[in-house]
Image (tube, grey):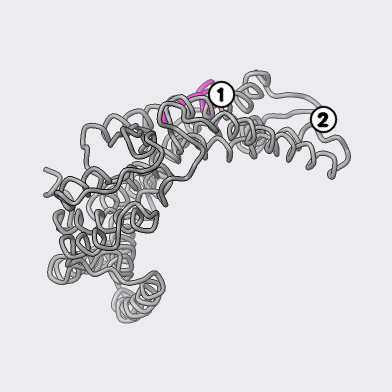
Amino acid sequence: MIKSLIAFNLTELKKKKILSEAKNLYASNVLSEEQWQKIKETYSSKLYSPSIFIRILFFILTIIGLSTISAPIGLIINSLDIHNFQLIFLVTGVAIMVITELVLIKANGHYLSGITEAGIYIGLTFIYFGVLNFDNNTIILYLVVGFLLTLFAAIRYLNMLALVATIIFFGWILFQLLYDLGGIFESLIPFSFMISFGLVYFSSVKLEKKLSNFIFNDQFIIIQTLSLLTIYIAGNYFVVRELSIELMGLNLSEGENIPFAFLFYGFTVLIPLGYIFWGIKNKSLLFLRTSLLTIILSVITFKYYFSLGQPVVTVTIAGFILITISLLIFNYLKKNRNGFTREKLLDDKWGSKNLTGIIASQTLGGNQIGEPEDPTIFKEGHFGGGGAGSSW
């Protein structure tokens, strides 16, 4: 099922992911030079993925090349009606997508090459304009079409930017539906966002455990991180107050609070603290790092409405609070807390699952890694994935 949904060769993609993780372990001095060389030989991938600078160059050149298509298309559709205009755009977009997938991805094994991304983005843009009739459509239809196209690209091509766009479209659709309904539904927008993205988060955690496939680690990290941030932003007092004034026409005199202000003040304070508690309890770097970001936003929020009149004093107090919280956590994790420590053991990404067990069992065979000095390190340790736990 998964193999039919994704355009890339999963076997080669797994090799590339394992090789990338092994490189992190080698940089962390977990793997020896001999083991690293053996892994490179065993998991050599046929996928073409150049350096970031080459990708950017390829992306720009491809955009310039494909943009030349616009000139003849513009001449052709200049004298056509709206339906023929849409048809040409749709056919052009589909053609670009087909060429990108069959020629670049399938035949030549391009993966994050810059050329594939340019083809995907331009192809989807042509399809978007080809599907929509901009004279008669409502804004919801624009959002739904955008959501479906970006969701397709996020799944089919494992595209990170498309995944972020999908989440944004989802939130925009939810907001627009409630806003169009008006009345009490407008008042429920913050709570609807908190509940909806809470469900998105827990559903992604459940799906991540069910798939048990490290290929999608980065995708789950994006989904869960954005979900946690959206839950906080939806309950943040500043966001709720300002949107109520700008979009819903709420009239407030100076010093007057929005309805249920105490509730949103509470969310602004308690959600970051809850993230810290959950991160320590469940050994999740994703929660801990997200909590620090939300704490900064909370400090800014309270500074905006309760300024002491002296910016230097306010900034000093804010910095003191952040440093105090960081030091308390740092001191608490000085000792190994059930496999969770303040020490950076691996050069790893934001809470992504490491593939140490896979590398050790499938690649090294009888070639064993030396026992570390501290028996609690790399022995039945637990590292949080994109919100979910894993062990090796």
Secondary structure mostly taken by the magenta-highlighted segment of the chain: helix
Rendering coords of residue 138 (x, y %):
40, 44
Q: Residue at x 82, y 35 (%)?
A: 307
Residue that appears at 33% across and 63% down = 121
Query: Which residue is at a point 64% across and 39% down the rendered structure image?
Result: 297
How far across and how far down the image is residue 84, in percent?
25, 66
Establish if 132 lies above or below 312.
Answer: below
Which residue carries the number 1 mark? Answer: 187
Residue 134 position by quadrant: bottom left
The image position of residue 308, as x and y in percent, is 86, 35
Mark yes or no: residue 193 visible: no
- Judge from the rendering whether residue 346 lies leftward or rightward of residue 184; answer left or right: left
The residue lying furthest to the right in this view is 309
Q: Would you call the spot at circle 1 few (<14 residues within 10 Å), some (14-19), or many (20 or more)? A: some
Q: Determine the residue positioned at 66% across, 24% down.
A: 265
Q: Is there a contact, CB below 8 Å, between mark 1 and mark 2?
A: no
Residue 79 at x, y percent in the picture = 32, 75
Q: Is residue 312 left or right of residue 141?
A: right
Q: Which mark is residue 374?
A: none
**Image check: 323 left or right of 95?**
right
Is residue 313 rendered to the left or right of residue 140?
A: right
The kind of residue tagged 2 is: Glu
Residue 68 in sight: yes
> In what quadrant of the picture does the C terminus appear?
top left
Image: magenta residue range: 184-197
Residue 59 lies in what quarter of the image?
bottom left
Q: Amino acid at mark 1?
A: Ser
Magenta run includes residue 259: no
Residue corresponding to mark 2 = 254
Q: Earlier in the sequence, mark 1 or mark 2?
A: 1
